[in-house]
Structures are given as structure tokens and as C-alpha cells.
Image (cartoon, helix red, strand yellow):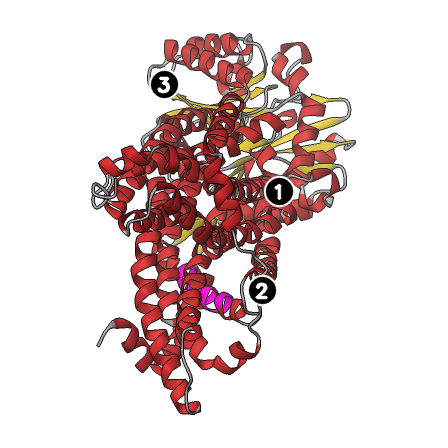
């Protein structure tokens, strides 16, 4: 008994099992932790990450934030500092206005205390947490501190950003799926020949999504980007498998002759479904491999968020394939009568006329696309990639509630009141001589953009005896093996000025202490820039190579892989080039993910058309007739597939207030349409122009010439 017959025979058991499996899936999904810290995915072997571990292990400090207080008296600021220090998981609160003994003459105080830490209208507290930046403990502490702060007090920093991001994601994520489902449902009802079938498609895909997200419990946690878009993306890339099964099933139903009674009709439907399952399994297995390959290519990123997304999505495609040949057939057979009553004529017209037009003017289309390639490549190289997490967070900040963008308001206040854009931390040797430590701090303080340097030697200077420093300052900045020096910079993270400043600070600290490390959001982001620039090249090359090899074996051709990959790569260049032309800012992870996902998920359009072309050529048709038949037969399926992908993602791109999610979905939606038009308009032209080469280099086509 073949696989399809087994599914049909055991359909009741399969349906029951599919429902039961939802229980552990939902439990696993709830239990999977979501990580909102994008710096967490940096490799463990880089200095910034190792330095952060030293800060946590030796000093007991993980994340840190700045609290900006406006229009508050000195004693009120001190009282606030004590309240904050009493919060769980707050390790230390440094209020520099209160650190120096009041008996010390004002002229003896370092400039850093006189000019940078306090101004007539505002004060600043440095709050260190005893847990990492994005841990639940730190986020709870930030939430508690926000409750303590008055109207004119604000808390900035990465932990504050992560907290706002978490709240917004938790509020929007479910709505993403809802938007994608509604738009996909409407599109499928219009494009397919049934009103009820798309509902069953979405139910089976929904089960596959639950299985996929529930199985993430084996990883313990996933990134917020994976959590936000995995369901939408799985819906978009696996919808094809359901459509393919439906087409195979209805083709066999429509070919039946006269049947005597209802029982005979029922038996014929079971037989048709068994054949449809086998046909679908054979076809979607080959189709899904390219999609899986595209996602798995992300696993080669040094920045491990790519691996996080890649594995979850590759797993999701597998669940999608399994559901399309098990759960969906069972549902279709269960609701046969409803499906019969709701069938209608598809609105997609026949494409014979367009196919003839394309083959008769194929040279014109090749020239048009070659001309388009020049500006596409130019603007592709003009992409505005951003690494500033604040820009990646709020895409519509001016229209959002203040409670949703608390970190943005606090960061702006920090910039306005103290001209501080970011802060770095130097982890230096605890035994560094005071003279050298002071000289090092002086050199750093003279750098452009450095507002203040806060360390034991910087604060003590040469005139204040060490014994006059409070114990809390020594305990905060001095560990058993290392000392901590805080450097406040007026430059914003990820800017060229900030990165140049970081390079100069590293040069200075290495002169005085070869083992010193510079850490913080700025240095980590600089590492992120260097790592992801390399990742983009590596992952793109690997995804192209993997898809090339798959097409080579599927089509048994040396030339067709070059042609198909070139067509989709053109689409990717145009997609990313449009962003360069419009000035759309792309969060750093978007280009590398789009380049692999668009290739892996839309090259299927090209494989579909090329496979049919090859079949027609082997069947004895000449070049033009084979291309026309393949084009007219494939265009409806390509349109349905691409529009399904588009509708599943475009709604999320419009709805989401999180810039990185919105941008991601915008490019995926746009990429599906660009790939669709490229395959429909360019690929037939290339097959016409390169037919002789294809026949020479493809097994089974040598005699077709």
C-alpha cells in the first residue's frame, strides 16, 4: 500500500493525532523564552563579549542604565537614588554629586564632576544591575524603577529599550498572524476555484505552525524576530503545498465519468486523494528542498540570530510539507460536501496570449531587463543599512504613545541635558598605577566627542587622597582583578564618528594596559557591523551554491541552474536596489536574510516553469511551442503562489510599529512580486534565447534538438 492510500485509510487516526499534538505544542510554545537582546547573538570569542562576562562575573554587574532627573533638588535626587538602590536586582546606584566629601573645596573637584555630571536643571544617576541586559530580572527592575520615577525622571539604556520592545512585540505578535491569515484567506478565495478550501488550507498550516513553534522548546529560547515573523513566513512559504494538493485532487475529480451512487462517488474521492497525496509528496519534496536550503544557509552566519531564524524556519517548512500530505487531505475528505458546494470559476484568465507575446518578442524583454540591471546594481550598492537599535525599534514613533517609547524619550533627554549619545566601559587591570590610569583617562577625555571619563583615577586626580573617596565608589568601580572606567560619548551608536572614537580609545588603553577591554553598546555594535558585513557575503555565496546544486540534480542540467539562479538574483538585486533608491533604512540583518529567503522560496517559480519546458521539449515540441506551453501552464500557479506570499506579509509590514519587523515584511512582500514578474517575463525569454545551450547541457534534451 502506497503512502497516499495509508493516509486515506487511517484518516481518522491522523486527524485525532493532529489534534492531540496541539496540546504539547501549545505548552512548548508558552514555555519557550523570547530573547529581545540583539547583542546577545554576537559570538562568544570576541573581546566585547568576554569583557561583558568579566563585568558580570567579577563586578556582579550586567546591564546598566542612566537615570536622568530634571528640576529636582539635590536632597530629592539623593532620596530617589536610595529608592532605586532598594529595587531587587539593582547592584549599585552612583550619584556622583554625593560621592565627594563636602569638606573638599569646590576648586579641587575634577572637571568631570563640575561640568559633565550635573547641570542647573538636571542630574544623572548611573544604575548598575546584577543581571544581564535582557534578563527577566533586569527588565523587572527597570519596570519597577519606572514606577518609582516622577514625571521629570527618565531611564535610558539597552535594558529600557529591550523592555519597551518586549511589551510592543507581545501586544502585536498575535495580530501579525491575524492580519496575515485574513489577507491570505481573501486572496486564496478569489484566486482559487473554491471558497471553503482556503479555510482548510489555513487550518492545516495553522496546526503546522503550532507544531513548529511548540518544538522550539528544545532550544530553550528564540529571538523576538523569529517569534514575530516565523508564523507569517511559514504561512507564506508553505501555502504552495496546500494549493498543489488541491489542484492535483480537483484535476482527478474533474476527470471522472458518470458514477452510479453516493458510495461510488465517495470511493472515487478517496482514490483521487490517495493519488493526489503521492503526486504532491513527490513534487513538494523537491520544491521544499530549495526553501529549506535558503533558510539553512542562515546558519552559517557568525551572528547567531541567523542560525536561530534559519533552523526554526527550515523546521517549519518540514512541518508544512508533512501537514500538507497528512492533515490537509484528511480535512478535505471530511468536508467534501461543503467543498463541492463552494467551488467556483477561478478569476485568473488563460495565459496563452501572453505566452505567445513573450516568445515572439523575447529579445526585447532580455534587453529591457539588461537595461534595468544597471540602475538596480547601482542602487543595490547604495543600501542604507542601520545598526542603531533605536532606529530599528520604532517605525512610527511620532504617532506612538509615550509609554511605548519610554527609552526613546529618555535617550533624547540624555542627549539634550548632558550631550551623551552612548557610554562605553573600560575593563582595565586593577593594579594599573594611579599615574598611568590618570594619564590614560586624560588622553581619552581629550578625544573628540568624549564628554567625561569616570574612573577612580579620573575622579581622584592628583589632589584628592584615596581615603577621601566613599567606600561605595571603590566597591562599584574596583574589583579583585580589574577596575571599571565609564566613558560617556556625545556620539550615537553605530555612527562613523562613534566607531572612529572607539578605535582611538582602544589604541590609548592598549598603550597603558595590553589586557584592557572596551565594552558597551557602542563597541559591541561596531563588532556587529564588521561581523555582519562578512556574514552577508558568506551566506549569500552559500545559499547560491546550495540552490545551484539542488537545481542541478532536480533538472539534471548544467546550464539551467545558472539561468534560474541568475533570474532570481536579479530579482533580489532589484528588491534591495529599490530600498537604496527610496532611501529606506534597512536594519542590518534584513539584507542578508532577504537575499537567502527570497532565493530559496521564489526560485520554485522558476523551477516550475523550467520543469514544464523540459517535459515539453522531451515530448517532441520545438523551442517556441515548448516555451509557450510551459509559460501559459505555469503562470497561474506562479501568480497564486506569489500573491499568497505577498498577502501573507504585506499586511504585517503595514500594521507593525516595530521598524525591523515592518521592513522585513515589506521586502519579503515586494520580493515575491518582483520574482513573480521576473520569472513570467524574463525566464521564458532566456529559455528561448538559450535553448540550444540548454539542450546540449541537459540530460534528456540532447535528442530534442
Residue stretch in magenta: 201-213
The local crowd at label 2, few if under 14, some if 14 to 19, many if 20 or more residues have their Cα within 10 Å, is many
Q: Nearer the viewer, mark 3 or mark 2?
A: 2
Q: Which residue is mark 3?
A: 431
Query: SS class of the residue under badge 3?
Result: loop
Location of residue 38 in the rendering, given as x and y in whole percent from the top left corner: 47, 39
Q: Nearer the viewer, mark 1 or mark 2?
A: 2
Q: Calculate the distance from the C-alpha at mark 3 to the C-alpha at mark 2.
A: 73 Å
The local crowd at label 1, few if under 14, some if 14 to 19, many if 20 or more residues have their Cα within 10 Å, is many
Q: Which residue is mark 2?
A: 189
Q: Total of numbered circles in the picture?
A: 3
Location of residue 547 in the rendering, given as x and y in whole percent from the top left corner: 31, 41
Location of residue 342 in the rendering, given as x and y in whole percent from the top left corner: 57, 75
44 with respect to 411 (left or right): left
Q: Which residue is mark 1?
A: 84
* Quadrant of the image containing the C terminus: top left
Q: Earlier in the sequence, mark 3 or mark 2?
A: 2
Amino acid at each position: 500500500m502506497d503512502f497516499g492510500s495509508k493516509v486515506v485509510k487511517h484518516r481518522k487516526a491522523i486527524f485525532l493525532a493532529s489534534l492531540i499534538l496541539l496540546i504539547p505544542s501549545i505548552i512548548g510554545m508558552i514555555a519557550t523564552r523570547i530573547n529581545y537582546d540583539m547583542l546577545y547573538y554576537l559570538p562568544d570569542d570576541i573581546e566585547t563579549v568576554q569583557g561583558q562576562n568579566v563585568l558580570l562575573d567579577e563586578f556582579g554587574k550586567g546591564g546598566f542604565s542612566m537615570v536622568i532627573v530634571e528640576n529636582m533638588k539635590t536632597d530629592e535626587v539623593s532620596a530617589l537614588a536610595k529608592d532605586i538602590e532598594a529595587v531587587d536586582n539593582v547592584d549599585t546606584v552612583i550619584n556622583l554629586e554625593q560621592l565627594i566629601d563636602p569638606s573638599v573645596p569646590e576648586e579641587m573637584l575634577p572637571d568631570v564632576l563640575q561640568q559633565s555630571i550635573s547641570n542647573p536643571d538636571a542630574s544623572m544617576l548611573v544604575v548598575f544591575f546584577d543581571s544581564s541586559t535582557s534578563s527577566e530580572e533586569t527588565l523587572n527592575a527597570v519596570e519597577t524603577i519606572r514606577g518609582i520615577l516622577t514625571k521629570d525622571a527618565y531611564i535610558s539604556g539597552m535594558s529600557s529599550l529591550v523592555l519597551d520592545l518586549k511589551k510592543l512585540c507581545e501586544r502585536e505578535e498575535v495580530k501579525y498572524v491575524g492580519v496575515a491569515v485574513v489577507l491570505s484567506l481573501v486572496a486564496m478565495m478569489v484566486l482559487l476555484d473554491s471558497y471553503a478550501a482556503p479555510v482548510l488550507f489555513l487550518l492545516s498550516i495553522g496546526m503546522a505552525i503550532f507544531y513548529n513553534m511548540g518544538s522550539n522548546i528544545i532550544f530553550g529560547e528564540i529571538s523576538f524576530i523569529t517569534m514575530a515573523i516565523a508564523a507569517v513566513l511559514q504561512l507564506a512559504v508553505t501555502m504552495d503545498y496546500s494549493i498543489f494538493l488541491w489542484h492535483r485532487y480537483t484535476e482527478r475529480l474533474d476527470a471522472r465519468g458518470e458514477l452510479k451512487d453516493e458510495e461510488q462517488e465517495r470511493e472515487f474521492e478517496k482514490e483521487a486523494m490517495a493519488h493526489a497525496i503521492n503526486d504532491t509528496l513527490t513534487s513538494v519534496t523537491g520544491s521544499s528542498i530549495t526553501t529549506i536550503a535558503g533558510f539553512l544557509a542562515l546558519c552559517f552566519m557568525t551572528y547567531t540570530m541567523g542560525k536561530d531564524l534559519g533552523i526554526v524556519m527550515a523546521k517549519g517548512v518540514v512541518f508544512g510539507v508533512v501537514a500538507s500530505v497528512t492533515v490537509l487531505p484528511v480535512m478535505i475528505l471530511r468536508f467534501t460536501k461543503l467543498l463541492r458546494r463552494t467551488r467556483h470559476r477561478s478569476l485568473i484568465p488563460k495565459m496563452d496570449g501572453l505566452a505567445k507575446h513573450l516568445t515572439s518578442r523575447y529579445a526585447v524583454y532580455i534587453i529591457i531587463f539588461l537595461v534595468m540591471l544597471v540602475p538596480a546594481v547601482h542602487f543595490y550598492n547604495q543600501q542604507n543599512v542601520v545598526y542603531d537599535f533605536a532606529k530599528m525599534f520604532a517605525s512610527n514613533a511620532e504617532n506612538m504613545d509615550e509609554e511605548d517609547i519610554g527609552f526613546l524619550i529618555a535617550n533624547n533627554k540624555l542627549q539634550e541635558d548632558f550631550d551623551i549619545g552612548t557610554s562605553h566601559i573600560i575593563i582595565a587591570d586593577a593594579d594599573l598605577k594611579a599615574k598611568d590610569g590618570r594619564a590614560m583617562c586624560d588622553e581619552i577625555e581629550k578625544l573628540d566627542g568624549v564628554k567625561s571619563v569616570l574612573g577612580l583615577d579620573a575622579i581622584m586626580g592628583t589632589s584628592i587622597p584615596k581615603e577621601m573617596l566613599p567606600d561605595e565608589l571603590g566597591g562599584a568601580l574596583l574589583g579583585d582583578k580589574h577596575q571599571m572606567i565609564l566613558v560617556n560619548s556625545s556620539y550615537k551608536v553605530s555612527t562613523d564618528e562613534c566607531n572612529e572614537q572607539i578605535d582611538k580609545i582602544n589604541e590609548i588603553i592598549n598603550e597603558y594596559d595590553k589586557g584592557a577591554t572596551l565594552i558597551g553598546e557602542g563597541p559591541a555594535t561596531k563588532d556587529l557591523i564588521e561581523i555582519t558585513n562578512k556574514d552577508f557575503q558568506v551566506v549569500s555565496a552559500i545559499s547560491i551554491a546550495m540552490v545551484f546544486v539542488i537545481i542541478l540534480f532536480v533538472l539534471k542540467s548544467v546550464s539551467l541552474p545558472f539561468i534560474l539562479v541568475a533570474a532570481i538574483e536579479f530579482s533580489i538585486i532589484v528588491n534591495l536596489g529599490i530600498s537604496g533608491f527610496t532611501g529606506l533604512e534597512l536594519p542590518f540583518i534584513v539584507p542578508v536574510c532577504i537575499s537567502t529567503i527570497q532565493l530559496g522560496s521564489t526560485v520554485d517559480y522558476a523551477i516550475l516553469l523550467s520543469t514544464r519546458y523540459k517535459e515539453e521539449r522531451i515530448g517532441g515540441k520545438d523551442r517556441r511551442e515548448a516555451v509557450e506551453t510551459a509559460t501559459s501552464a505555469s503562470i497561474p500557479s506562479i501568480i497564486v503562489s506569489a500573491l499568497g506570499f505577498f498577502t501573507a506579509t504585506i499586511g504585517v509590514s503595514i500594521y507593525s510599529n516595530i521598524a525591523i519587523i515592518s521592513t522585513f515584511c515589506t521586502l519579503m512582500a515586494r520580493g515575491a512580486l518582483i520574482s513573480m514578474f521576473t520569472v513570467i517575463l524574463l525566464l521564458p525569454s532566456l529559455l528561448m534565447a538559450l535553448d540550444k545551450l540548454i539542450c546540449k547541457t541537459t540530460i534528456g534534451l540532447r535528442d530534442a534538438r
